[in-house]
Amino acid sequence: DNPALKLTIRWSPGHEKIPGNEHADQEAKLAAEGKVSPNDQLPQVLCQGPLPHSVSAIKQAYRAQTKRTWQIEWARSPRYAKTAAIDAKLPSASYLDLTESLTRPQASLIMQL
């Protein structure tokens, strides 16, 4: 809400010796370390506490963490050794997609077959 403040954002290739680019890199590093400019130099929206998180990024990180946890648990399972002897890729993504709409007993029966 400062009419005297003019902000222009332009993309530039990194590390190209553009005047001001090295200074911007240094300032970005300081900000990442929590060493920011005084609040009177920042737009008010940036001074009102933490910025909102991207819901999409949170969901993506959650799915990735869930997948890593599942892979660890599956590798520890006694069933993993049995299925890995048949096919190390089991359960594949395509199998999981095909059985997603089935009940657990139905998916189990298909796996046994």
Image (cartoon, helix red, strand yellow):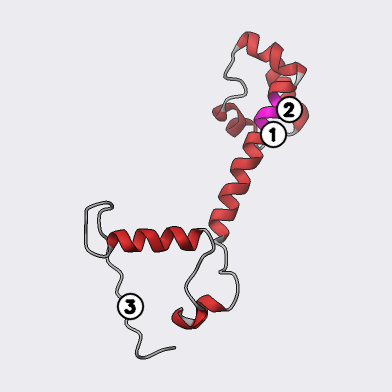
| Mark 2 residue type | Gln
Say which residue label 1 marks: 102
Expressed as whole percent of the image width and height from the top left, the position of residue 20 reads: 27, 65
Dominant secondary structure of the residues highlighted in magenta in the image: helix
Expressed as whole percent of the image width and height from the top left, the position of residue 34 reads: 54, 63
Quadrant of the rendering where the C terminus is positioned? top right
Chain part drawn in magenta? 70-74
Say which residue label 2 marks: 106
Residue 39 visible in the snapshot: yes
Q: Residue furthest bottom?
A: 3
Query: Do callouts 1 and 2 mark residues in contact (Cβ within 8 Å)?
Result: yes
| Mark 3 residue type | Leu
- Depth check: give the residue in front, 85 or 100: 85
Residue 71 forms part of the magenta stretch:
yes
Question: Which quadrant would residue 65 be assigned to in this image?
Answer: top right
Q: Residue at x 46, y 61 (%)?
A: 30
Mark 3 Cα-neighbour bin, 10 Å: few <14, some 14–19, many ≥20: few
